[in-house]
Image (cartoon, rainbow, N blue to C red):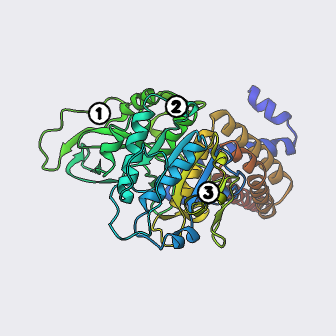
């Protein structure tokens, strides 16, 4: 009775507004059922991909220096099939002499060079007094000396950690316990010189998650492996931990909680190493990064852009590799540009097969890695929107749209409301996204269509009753 009296005390416009709000709330609840719908997900993903692309070149990656094997460098090196190991050695030594904070080598060092393939070798300094030999011998001597001389020392002591990328291949011996093909580490010719890879030279996984449309949007913070069962941290995670000066062993313990259960391909008994139960763990990368299953595959921002025409990245510190490897003493490039930075060595030359689809188009793999490292050290990812923020945004939309439908007929109200949602997505939506929160405009737009249909139906129903009377 009280509710009926309250309803009767309202004016016609107030009752209309209340009905519109009730319809909006009902539609929001109903639309939530379609949040995981595949078609809606594709539209939402396409929109988010486009929005993320708009942030290109908004960050110059000031903490990162890219020593780029560009087209000019590649031609100067006489287009070798494998990165010349003596040149790679000189690039690493340049970063060491420049007092880099971390050195990331995004070059496959699985195989040795082919004798006679490369141009005349340039000796690499700091090789521990080793006699000049082949490019491979120079490189191995340098790593062996570095691993020995810098054991237990850090970047402050002139020994920046070196992160190598490990080639991962499908295992022919094991599957994961769910039957999925397992991956294993492929041996490298530098293994003996690097040792166990526990510092100052480390191994990492260069893999990213690739979506069904062959686009890289998500990082992959660790890679579960078999033969034996283990977990390899990603290059960006390891670089972030080392850049922050955090405990690498503690990070390894954290990712090891995701060790997989492996079973032989023949289907026999599982290996003795079984998966531990993943727990919520924290890794210090300058801030507490939560390592959980949903954080392993998280969308990161591409803020360092790429000009495909000039073949250059929009970075504050970008040096073509030939300016380091081919310069004589008189014209040597000043290594101090590397001071305190994460130095990434990798290629962007056109013949490089390491190009992939991203929200910014086709990018060299090294620039993808640079964006991932930059995003990780700045906590720059798209994360789950807090419930209170989602509710606040939905409530604001419901109230606004209810007012629009109160004063305008159904079709104009639908158009105006849709325009408001689109404008909000392109203004406030970018503000929220820049903070890491995606405000989904897809479901509100669907809700507006439903609201307009209900409004049209209600109008026709009232019109029909008036004619009948």
- Residue 381 appears in the picture as rendered: no
SS for callout 1: loop
| Badge number at residue 275 | 1
Label 2 or label 1, whichever comes before in sequence order: 2
Percent position (x, y) of residue 108? 40, 56
Q: Nearer the viewer, mark 1 or mark 3?
A: 3
Q: Nearer the viewer, mark 2 or mark 3?
A: 3
* Quarter that holds the N terminus: top right
Label 2 or label 3, whichever comes before in sequence order: 2
- Residue shown at 41%/69% (left/top)? 118
Label 1 or label 3, whichever comes before in sequence order: 1
Asked if residue 141 lies left or right of residue 214, the reply is: left
- Residue shown at 29%/33% (left/top)? 275
- Residue 98 appears in the picture as rendered: yes
The reply to whether callout 2 and callout 3 are in contact (CB within 8 Å) is no
Asked if residue 339 lies left or right of residue 141, the reply is: right
- The residue labelled by disc 2 is 154
Vertical comparison of 275 with 35: above or below: above
Q: Nearer the viewer, residue 398 or 289?
A: 289
SS for callout 3: helix
Q: Nearer the viewer, residue 157 or 70?
A: 157
The reply to whether callout 1 and callout 3 are in contact (CB within 8 Å) is no
| Badge number at residue 329 | 3
Pointer 3 local density, CA inside 10 Å: few below 14, some 14–19, many at least 20? few
Percent position (x, y) of residue 36? 51, 50
Q: How many dots with numbers?
A: 3
Pointer 1 local density, CA inside 10 Å: few below 14, some 14–19, many at least 20? some
SS for callout 2: loop
């Amino acid at each position: 009775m009280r509710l009926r009296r309250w309803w009767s005390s309202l004016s016609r416009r107030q009752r209309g507004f209340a009905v519109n709000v009730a319809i909006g709330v009902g539609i929001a609840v109903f639309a939530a059922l379609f949040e995981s719908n595949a078609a809606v997900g594709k539209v939402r993903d396409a929109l988010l991909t486009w929005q993320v692309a708009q942030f290109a070149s908004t960050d110059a990656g000031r903490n990162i220096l890219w020593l780029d094997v560009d087209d000019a460098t590649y031609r100067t090196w006489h287009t070798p099939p494998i990165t010349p190991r003596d040149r790679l050695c000189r690039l690493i030594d340049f970063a060491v002499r420049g007092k880099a904070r971390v050195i990331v080598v995004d070059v496959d060092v699985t195989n040795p060079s082919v004798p006679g393939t490369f141009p005349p070798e340039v000796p690499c300094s700091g090789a521990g007094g080793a006699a000049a030999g082949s490019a491979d011998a120079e490189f191995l001597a340098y790593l062996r000396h570095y691993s020995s001389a810098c054991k237990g020392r850090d970047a402050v002591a002139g020994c920046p950690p070196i992160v190598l990328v490990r080639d991962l291949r499908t295992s022919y011996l094991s599957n994961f316990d769910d039957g999925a093909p397992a991956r294993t580490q492929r041996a490298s010719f530098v293994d003996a010189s690097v040792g166990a890879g526990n510092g100052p030279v480390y191994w990492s996984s260069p893999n990213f998650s690739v979506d069904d449309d062959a686009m890289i949007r998500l990082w992959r913070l660790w890679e579960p492996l078999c033969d034996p069962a283990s977990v390899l941290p990603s290059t960006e995670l390891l670089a972030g931990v080392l850049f922050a000066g955090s405990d690498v062993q503690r990070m390894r313990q954290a990712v090891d909680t995701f060790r997989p259960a492996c079973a032989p391909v023949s289907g026999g008994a599982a290996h003795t190493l079984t998966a531990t139960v993943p727990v919520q763990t924290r890794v210090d990368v300058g801030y507490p990064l939560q390592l959980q299953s949903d954080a392993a595959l998280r969308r990161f921002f591409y803020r360092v852009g790429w000009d495909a025409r000039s073949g250059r990245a929009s970075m504050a510190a970008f040096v073509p590799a030939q300016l380091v490897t081919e310069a004589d003493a008189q014209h040597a490039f000043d290594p101090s540009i590397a001071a305190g930075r994460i130095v990434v060595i990798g290629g962007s030359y056109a013949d490089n097969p390491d190009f992939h689809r991203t929200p910014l188009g086709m990018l060299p793999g090294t620039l993808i890695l640079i964006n991932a490292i930059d995003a990780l050290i700045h906590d720059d990812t798209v994360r789950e929107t807090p419930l209170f923020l989602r509710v606040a945004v939905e409530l604001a939309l419901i109230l606004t749209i209810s007012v629009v439908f109160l004063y305008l007929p159904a079709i104009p109200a639908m158009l105006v409301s849709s325009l408001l949602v689109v404008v909000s997505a392109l203004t406030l939506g970018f503000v929220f996204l820049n903070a890491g929160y995606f405000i989904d405009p897809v479901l509100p737009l669907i809700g507006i269509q439903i609201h307009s249909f209900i409004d049209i139906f209600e109008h026709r129903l009232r019109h029909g009753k008036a004619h009948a009377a």
